[in-house]
Image (cartoon, rainbow, N blue to C red):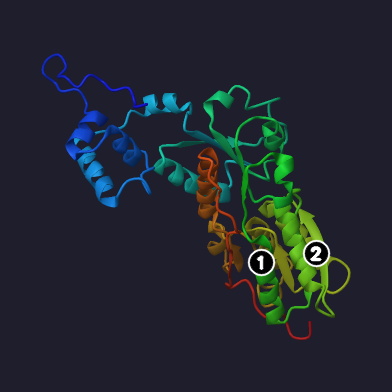
Amino acid sequence: MNDPEPDPRPAAGGTPARPTSRDVARAAGVSQATVSLVLGGKWRGRVSERTADLVREAARGLGYRPNLAARNLRLGRTRTALLVVPALTSEFFARVYTGAAEVAARHDFGVVLYPSPAGIGPARDPFASARSALDGVIASSMAADALRAIRGTDLPLVMLDSDPDDLTDTGAAASVNLDIADGMRQVTEHLLGLGHRHFAHLASAVPSWTFDIRARALRDRLAREPGVTVRTVPAPLDVAAGRKAAGAALTGPGPRPTALVCDDDLLAAGACKAVRRLGLRVPEDVSVTGFDDLALATAVEPELTTVRLPAERIGERGMTALLAVLENRPPATGDLPVTLLPRGSSGPPPAGS
């Protein structure tokens, strides 16, 4: 069934009506079905590259624009995805949104944001009224309150940074993960290679699979090293909490940590402040590492050694996975790689420590 077409005859006053897919087909010497395949991005394997080029050239020459509203009605879709994130103020999730929106735009989709409320729960079902206006949901596992509301809906769900074993429980059709464990292993190997033996883990107080994985990877790697000590101090994800947690770790009983391993860059920035307030130096007395590679990682002095997480790629992969689910195709699998960026905040421990 083709899109409804406007009358191709000149409108009153002699102004031509906008070109139709029939006009494009005639100009390219192909059928309307072929035009629909090419301009809908579904021509590969059905139409030759040369024919696709002819159709696109004819469409450009005529100034043709597809009737998206009519096509959406025909498909029964609104071509809108919901991205659920913990907060709008997070640089990391802003980059996730950018990646998702770029892929969506290439497929005539829109992406709307739903931040999971902090401190209070969401409405009883924030998706009830919006369900008919959505094609699917992409959600961070950190947005726990919102996820509880999503469960039980008939919307296709793609989870970001979530436990693969929980896909059935969440009702997710696909998941997109980073190789978080490898990131923490890279941090640990880096610090061990520098000679550190006394560690403190500034661990996120947010209950989430991604932070559980970081703690487990750090603990498992250090367990294989004789003579190594590690203490864990939980903290909310902000600079002030990082400063407080680092102060507690550095002044607590037992050997003073020479390496502070932080679950994100905000905690690491706070840890650097705590080190200086105690009259110590980074990295000469205490090394500090972060996670995420936010903008502040290179704004502080010394610059943070941290793990770069490809936030835009997460958004791109999430949106691509949702499109695959909607088209009954298998989404891509495999974790996205992460990269350690050694910078000035890490160095060898002080002699004799």
Image location of residue 341, percent across then percent down: 57, 69
Image disc number at residue 150? none
Image location of residue 190, percent across then percent down: 66, 76
Which one is in front, 250 or 82?
82
Spatial separation of the CA atoms under disc 1 and disc 2: 25 Å
Q: Residue at x 59, y 55 (%)?
A: 333
Q: Check the image and name the residue furthest to the right.
A: 253
Q: Is residue 184 visible?
A: yes
Q: On the rendered structure, is 41 left or right of 134? A: left
Q: Check the image and name the residue furthest to the left.
A: 14
Which one is closest to the eye, mark 1 or mark 2?
1
Which one is in front, 93 or 169?
169
The tag earlier along the polypeptide, 1 or 2, is 1
Quarter of the image where one finds residue 201 = bottom right
Mark 2: which amino acid? Ala
> Does residue 4 sit above or below 137 in this rendering?
above
Q: Residue at x 42, y 25 (%)?
A: 74
> Does residue 102 sit above or below 196 in this rendering?
above
Q: Secondary structure at mark 1?
A: helix
Image disc number at residue 249? 2
> Does residue 332 sit above or below 13 in this rendering?
below
Image disc number at residue 182? 1
Image location of residue 163, percent across then percent down: 71, 51
Q: Residue at x 57, y 60 (%)?
A: 293
